[in-house]
Amino acid sequence: MKQKESDPMKPVGPFKASKDGAYRFGLNLMYATALEESLRLIEDIEREYEEAIANNDYEMIDTKKRELDYCLSCLEVGSIVAASTSGIAE
């Protein structure tokens, strides 16, 4: 009779479910932190953009507009990726 080889470090049963839950929880924490930081940066750039408009600083308006567009695009792409990979197993 052939003995089944198994990895003693591979979790099974309730331990596997706990490991998977902890892994997903960690990913969610990282995503939430990245999202919070992104939103904070966007708020800062928006404030600087509005100040540049108030001061008629055309060079700064252009710079901050490009930064804001870039940040919003990154946030959009990150959200799409996070939504599309939420069901993928590690």
Image: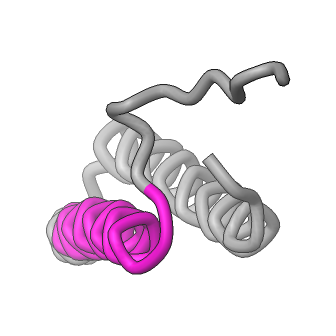
In front of the other: 50 or 84: 84
The residue at 22%/75% (across/down) is: 36
* Residue 63, x across and y down, in percent: 39, 39
Is 61 magenta? The answer is no
Residue at 36% over, 50% down? 64
Q: Is residue 59 above or below residue 81?
A: above
Above or below: residue 4 compared with residue 85: above
Is residue 49 something that shows in the picture? no
Q: Is residue 13 left or right of residue 50?
A: right
Is 32 inside the magenta-drawn segment?
A: yes
Q: Position of residue 62 (x, y in %)?
A: 47, 44
- Name the quadrant containing residue 77: bottom right
Q: Quadrant of residue 44?
A: bottom left
Residue drawn at 63 percent across, 65 percent down: 82
The percent position of residue 21, horizontal first and vertical second, equals 38, 76
Question: Residue at left 40%, top 79%?
Answer: 14
Look at the picture and state if 64 lies above or below 39: above
Left or right of 10 in this view: 52: left
Residue 50 in sight: yes
Image coordinates for residue 43, horizontal then vertical, percent: 23, 77
Part of the protein shown in magenta: 12-41
The prevailing secondary structure element of the residues shown in magenta is helix
Q: Is residue 83 left or right of residue 36?
A: right
Number of callouts = 0
Whether residue 27 is situated above or below residue 1 in the rendered picture: below
The quarter of the picture where the N terminus appears is top right
Which residue is nearer to you in this view: 23 or 85? Answer: 23
State the image quarter where residue 53 is shown.
bottom left
Q: How is the image coloured?
A: one colour
